[in-house]
Amino acid sequence: MKEIYIIRHGETELNRQGIVQGRGINSDLNALGRAQAEAFYQTYKDIPFDKIYTSDLKRTWQTVQKFIDSGLPWERLSGLDELAWGIWEGKPNTESARDAFREMLQSWENGNYTAHFEGGESVQDVYERLKQPMEILMTRPEEKTVLLCMHGRAMRVFLCLLLGKPLSEMIEFPHQNTVLYKMGFEDGKFTVLEFNSAVHLDGIVIE
């Protein structure tokens, strides 16, 4: 069985402020995000990863930088980028912003997967571009153990894609920063081996 460790990136300052970043904002990790990345590394550094995949946004590769620095092969896949939130990216966390997002999330839960903000992507758009990373995971048998770092909304879409679930069930996948979903791939099928694991975040220390 192939094992795939899928994690969300560590916290950024905009995460802390409750501001949506999306595909168009290339934020750095903040102090807590760096501590989360270190905690994940210390917990999983002895796993014999064959390959690392990240999105094109630096908050993902900063999260797994120590694995990369250890010499592991690393590939960036733009298909793993976060959903583009269009005109709302980087905007203050106001009541009107929260209302707009609540309405959009409700549209998706109701099955309107092509709904999107001006200048942004729908979850259907993200679902389609995530098929390329999925194909890569399915067709490289020499990569037995893989570490993949991506983004919250895109990760929820990816888990629906891998598990054959409708996008209306995205809400079933919690996604705090650096949370882990460990997946198995065998006989053409993906399964969940660990769900929403955050054991590495216990007792985290910010330097």
Image (cartoon, rainbow, N blue to C red):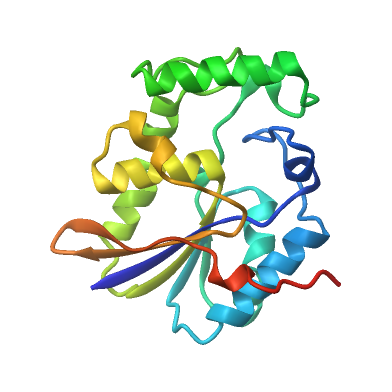
Residue 40 % position (x, y): 60, 72
Residue 163 % position (x, y): 26, 47
Please name the residue shown 45% across and 71% down the image. Answer: 51
Residue that sits furthest to the front in the current view: 203
Q: In this view, does 33 lie above or below 106?
A: below
How many numbered marks, from 0 up? 0
- Give the position of the C terminus as an image quadrant: bottom right
Please name the residue shown 82% across and 61% down the image. Answer: 31
Q: Is residue 34 above or below residue 132?
A: below
Residue that sits furthest to the right in the current view: 207
Q: In this view, does 104 lie above or below 160?
A: above
Residue that sits furthest to the left in the current view: 187
- Give the position of the N terminus as an image quadrant: bottom left
Please name the residue shown 64% across and 21% down the image. Answer: 86
Residue 43 % position (x, y): 57, 80
Image quadrant assignment for residue 189: bottom left
In the image: residue 103, left or right of residue 134: right
Is residue 89 among what the camera can see?
A: yes
In the image: residue 3, left or right of residue 52: left
Q: Foreground: 131 or 94?
A: 94
Q: In this view, does 8 lie above or below 64?
A: above
Q: Foreground: 132 or 95?
A: 95
Q: Foreground: 146 or 14?
A: 14
Residue 140 % position (x, y): 29, 65
Is residue 68 among what the camera can see?
A: no
